[in-house]
Image (cartoon, rainbow, N blue to C red):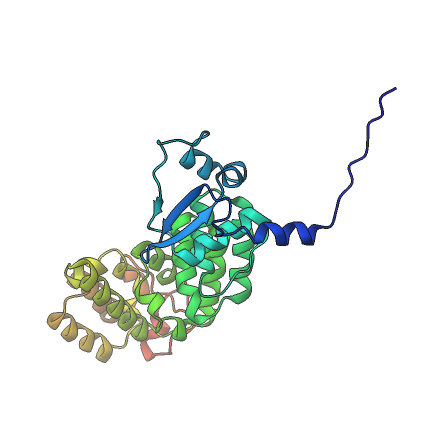
Amino acid sequence: METSGLVVHGQDAPFSTALRSLVNNPWYSDVRFVVGQERQEVFAHRCLLACRCNFFQRLLGTEPGPGVPSPVVLSTVPAEAFLAVLEFLYTNSVKLHRQSVLEVLTAAVEYGLEELRKLCLEYVVKVLDVELVCEALQVAVTFGLRPLQERCIAFIEVHSQEALRTRGFLELSATALLPLLRSDKLCVDEAELVQAARNWARVGAAVLERPVAEVAAPVVPELRLALLAPAELSALEEQNRREPLIPVEQIVEAWKCHALRRGDAVRGAPCRCRRGTRPREHHRFLDLPFK
């Protein structure tokens, strides 16, 4: 009579160590990659990549042959991130680093590695800080990672002034910036937020070689100009003449709020105070102050 048998397991550590020694090891390697802008050469093993990841199975094909270029060029993924992906594929574990985790997360999403994606997300949340948060927000928006996006926005709402001064903020896309500007919970005054939006648009204009006002157009409607005092609004109007940023019609709507002393007189962006809005005399006429 045939018995069902019993699956027994050896120690995990020696097995993982042995496989880790094959990461980027030319020993028995049968596929070579050139990765990143630095064009670093990386050695790998076709059968292991193909059985662990559908992306590599499609990329490398089911049979070795002349159809697969040698080396395989992957110019968009940095070498450090690609080596982390290989480490995970070979050992089912990976050592993550704060300075490269977003690049590893991006590769995990692009290569369809769900488990690695989750590990990266957990790590990002643990190490999230002022310098990292805007970069993480951009990745979250780009790849539709809603929980990470919400976590980043909540962090920025608490650390608004610091986050607005980072390079990551200046490099946000308009799509990533919009949910921030729509938040009532930002701990920053509107005057500072207007200046941050101007700085952001200047950087985008230089990169894209487009006018500042054109770059800013998708996001400036979310600026709550009616929160500014008349003297501040006049100064903004003068600056706007020298360097167009905000449509004249939007400034006119803010003046209308002051003239009529009614927050509901303004079309478009609400007159609600944000968490960090400094009190001004005319705010008592505005609707729905933040509480």
On the rendered image, what quadrant is the N terminus found in? top right
x then y, percent, for residue 132? 43, 66
Task: Report the front residue among 79 and 260.
Answer: 79
Apparent side of residue 54 relative to residue 19 in the rendered image (left or right): left
- Residue drawn where x is 45% and y is 29% of the image: 63
Task: Report the front residue among 138 and 17.
Answer: 17
Relative to residue 18, is residue 128 depicted above or below? below
x then y, percent, for residue 224? 30, 66
- Residue drawn where x is 54% and y is 36% of the image: 51
Which quarter of the figure has residue 245? Answer: bottom left
> Is residue 228 something one can see in this rendering?
yes
Q: Residue furthest top?
A: 1
> Is residue 256 something one can see in this rendering?
no
x then y, percent, for residue 269? 31, 59
Task: Report the front residue among 259 and 38.
Answer: 38
- Residue drawn where x is 35% and y is 31% of the image: 67
Which quarter of the figure has residue 80? Answer: bottom left
x then y, percent, for residue 209? 15, 59
Relative to residue 84, is residue 89 depicted above or below? above
Task: Report the front residue among 128 and 162.
Answer: 128
